[in-house]
Amino acid sequence: MATRTPPAPSSETKVPRTERGRQTLRKLLDAAAKEFGEKGFHEASISGITRRAGMALGSFYTYFDSKDEIFRALVKDMSGQVASHAGGAITPDLAPFEVERAALRAFLEFARDNKEVYRIVDEAEFVDPASFREHYETTARRILTRLKKGEAAGAFQPGMEEAHAWALMGMNVFLGLRYCVWDEDTDADRVADMANDLLRNGIGRD
Amino acid sequence: MATRTPPAPSSETKVPRTERGRQTLRKLLDAAAKEFGEKGFHEASISGITRRAGMALGSFYTYFDSKDEIFRALVKDMSGQVASHAGGAITPDLAPFEVERAALRAFLEFARDNKEVYRIVDEAEFVDPASFREHYETTARRILTRLKKGEAAGAFQPGMEEAHAWALMGMNVFLGLRYCVWDEDTDADRVADMANDLLRNGIGRD
């Protein structure tokens, strides 16, 4: 992944006070993404994480108390990374439909570069249901804010509500799974164009 | 659940030759849905399944060799039940958009009555990835067949393809999770109307 966002602060994570500490935490979270992504929560181990991070086992406990705690922090961190990638692709000059296309395009790119994000978020449904729910609720709220903004600007139909945000989120998540995680043969721009056209015009012929 | 579909035949399941055998298999699968849905794959046990089914432990082995095998059969069975519920709601008199509305409405009802379907299918991603993939690929193929039929009838835009089916499936799955599994306050008819309108007209204002 080209850009690295700072770790999302979590109430449980001991927030590092120095830049060096922040870098160490970032390394631990990246190593945890690989460890949990490859092995799944149950097979993953703290020693596997520190080994991947090239650190001594003891360093882990400066930041986290347990495997559960770093998993929880990782889901929050990945959720934040998804948000910041989408957010980073949205520039002030974009019209509301262009914003949705850019957000989906950025998400597809993120999913392609970080295939483990699906496995980790999906496993949270079993390992840490509150984090799973929080990820989707937060994402849906962010989408709804965009939809209401587009409605206010006169680009989207009146009456945008939560269900529209969930429909759009589901569409984006499944397109990412099919065309970025399972199979990369389809051009992401083509997928984003199709989805944006569906969102704009629907599939009705009239 | 009001109607019970016959168990989907699986290459591994010993297909019962008698009506009584088929009923016993149905009971085992229904008990397995409850056991896996409540406890998750790892905590679930064969004895828990037979206890819920009101059977002797030995009866299990007439049909399945292992917990893995009944889990695999259950995912296939639930996938078949989702399909037959949607299919059962589609009558020959319905126009293409009415077909999509009816299929979603039936799916939402199924999800509300069988909340464990999400947990079981989602856990298959970890326990039995091939079944997880097979469920979504099969569902997407079924949706694409409907979309192409609607296109041929002149109701849908030309060029319906697999990505449209995945977008529609994702929309439906996420609406079911939010409004039927997590929370039942929102009227399913209202959700189906919103989704159908999005599919027909998009959210563009022009």
Image: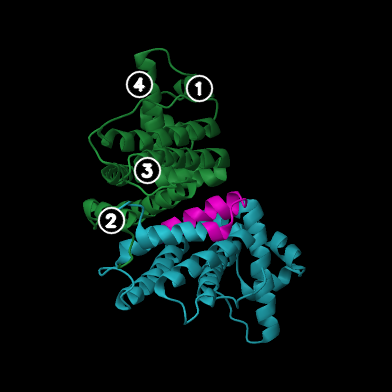
Chain colours: A cyan, B green
Do labels 3 and 1 touch, CB within 8 Å?
Answer: no
Q: Of marks 3 and 1, which one's residue comes earlier in the chain?
A: 1
Q: Which residue is mark 3?
A: B151
Residue type indicated by callout 4: Gln
> Badge 4: how crowded within 10 Å, few (<14), some, or many (20+)?
some
Q: CA distance from mark 2 to mark 3?
A: 17 Å
* Image quadrant assignment for residue A162: bottom left
Residue at image mark 2:
B197
Q: Where does residue A154 sit, x and y in percent of width and height? A: 30, 75
Q: Residue at x 46, y 43 (%)?
A: B121
Residue A126: x %, y % from top left: 49, 53
Does the segment drawn in magenta span residue A185?
yes
Q: Main secondary structure of the magenta part?
A: helix
Density class for disc 3 (Cα within 10 Å; few <14, some 14-19, many ≥20) is some
Across and down, in percent, residue B88 comes to 29, 33
In this view, B162 is above or below A110: above
Which span is picked out in magenta? A169-190
Find residue B61 and name its label: 1
Q: Is residue B93 above or below residue A172?
A: above
* Secondary structure state at the residue bearing disc 1: helix
